Image (tube, helix red, strand yellow):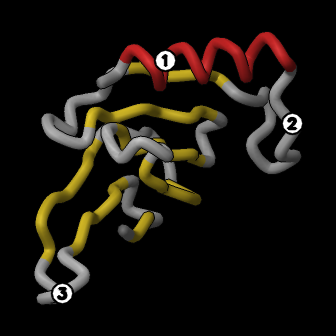
Amino acid sequence: MTSSGDRTVRVWDARTGRREAVIVGDTDSVTAASFAPDGRSIVTSSLDGTARIYPARSLAPFGTLEAWADAEARVPLTKGQRDEFENLLRSSG
């Protein structure tokens, strides 16, 4: 999986190197993307100051969490924000 300054995430087949999907939904450069531990969701973070959750099967945006007011500062999530994020992940499958 690769994140990009063009506001997309690309999912690649590790065996063939073929692009399997392009995720579009972030409104600024995507700085990171990862599968959730259970593999059912993809989580992105963006310079727009949000984290987004996409179900891995449909790739349609499921939820957005405004994780920090200033993406450049990388302010850590509060416990309440972490709980909200975890609840979004659990319900996205």
In the figure, residue 71 lies in which quadrant? top right
Q: Which residue is mark 3?
A: 15
Q: Are marks 2 and 3 in contact (CB under 8 Å)?
A: no
Circle 2 is placed at which residue position?
76
- Categorize mark 3 by other alpha carbons within 10 Å: few (<14), some (14-19), many (20+): few
Residues at marks 2 and 1, CA–CA distance in whole angstroms: 18 Å
Find residue 61 and report its image quarter. top left
**Residue 56 image position (x, y, % from top left):** 25, 42
Assess whether mark 1 and mark 3 are in contact (beta carbons under 8 angstroms).
Answer: no
Q: Nearer the viewer, mark 3 or mark 1?
A: 3
Please, what secondary structure does the residue beneath circle 2 have? loop
Is residue 78 or residue 6 the one in the foreground?
A: 78
Q: Amino acid at mark 1?
A: Leu
Q: Residue furthest front?
A: 38
- Can you tell which of label 2 and label 3 is closer to the viewer? 3
Position of residue 18 relative to residue 69, above or below, is below
What is the quadrant of the C terminus in the image? top left
Residue type of the residue flagged with mark 3: Arg
- Residue type for callout 2: Pro
Residue lying at 59% horizontally and 33% vertically, measured from the top left: 50
Which numbered circle lies on residue 39?
none
What residue is at 56 percent from the left and 35 percent from the top? 51
Residue at the spot of label 1:
88
Q: Quadrant of the N terminus?
A: bottom left
Question: Alpha-carbon distance for marks 3 and 1?
Answer: 31 Å
Determine whether, in the image, residue 60 is placed left or right of residue 65. Answer: left
Q: Give the camera-side residue of 67 and 83.
A: 83
Measured from the top left, where is residue 92 in percent x and y? 35, 21
Q: Secondary structure at mark 3?
A: loop
